[in-house]
Amino acid sequence: MDDGQLLQRFVREFARGTVLFREGELGREMFVIQGGRVTISKAIGKVEKVLSTLGQGEFFGEMSILCDRPRSATATVSEEARILIIDAKTFEAMVRSNAEVAIRMIKKLAERLQEADDLISNLLLRDVSSRVVHYLATAAERAGRGGGPVRLAVTQKQLPALVGAAGAQVEEIFGRLLRARIVQLEAECIVVPEVAKLRHFLDLLQTKQPGGAP
């Protein structure tokens, strides 16, 4: 089956707000985004925390196929999307016949392990200010390996869910970052002009609050 036939047979369109699967459900399919965006979130205590927002070319849901375990998070369409849905049998055939698919999968899983480590480090910070700055710094470091300003595909409104904190607390620290010109706002994104300055600001916060106490 060529790429055109695969798309015609397995691609579906989903409206914004559609829940593709929920945390804890059994899963027998993985998903590849052809267009639009999907938000991955997880319940942490009483807070629904956004883990990531995925765009064109990204895939998700593969762990249920690989490990035969329930979904570890919830996937929601955040921007009208066209998504390629692949069942376990088709996925196995793709990996066996195309080494490039397997290599891409390994690289992506390695990236997600690093993101999981970053998330754990963030959750260990009890101070909200440190969590906000830590999230922005680690995201900018991952995205800006070539140096220069980094544009993060996240908005100020999304930050509270991303760091698991109240909106007013996040707004306060983000305002400080804006006034200090450590970050900037553009349409649908946050800009980090110099990642080193953001990391330095985080070091200052942690120095003032030994042990991460609030």
Image (cartoon, rainbow, N blue to C red):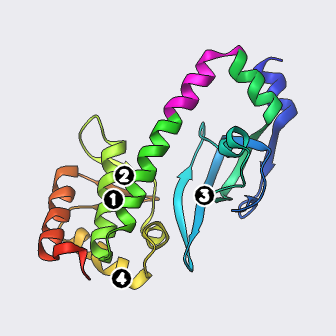
Q: The residue under label 3 is which amino acid type?
A: Thr
Residue under label 2: 139
Residue under label 3: 39
How many other residues sit within 10 Å of disc 2, few (<14), some (14-19) or many (≥20)?
some
- Magenta stretch contains residue 100: yes
Residue nearest the observer in this picture, 149 or 115: 115
| Secondary structure state at the residue bearing disc 2 | helix
Q: CA distance from mark 3 to mark 4?
A: 23 Å
Q: From this view, report whether residue 40 is shown above or below residue 32.
A: below
**Residue 91, position in %: x, y?**
75, 30
**Residue 64, position in %: x, y?**
71, 46
Q: The residue under label 1 is which amino acid type?
A: Leu
Do the numbered discs 3 and 1 sit on residues whose CB atoms are within 8 Å? no
Q: Earlier in the sequence, mark 3 or mark 1?
A: 3
Q: CA distance from mark 2 to mark 3?
A: 16 Å
Q: The residue under label 4 is which amino acid type?
A: Gln
- Magenta stretch contains residue 137: no
Residue under label 4: 169
| Secondary structure state at the residue bearing disc 1 | helix
Do the numbered discs 2 and 4 sit on residues whose CB atoms are within 8 Å? no
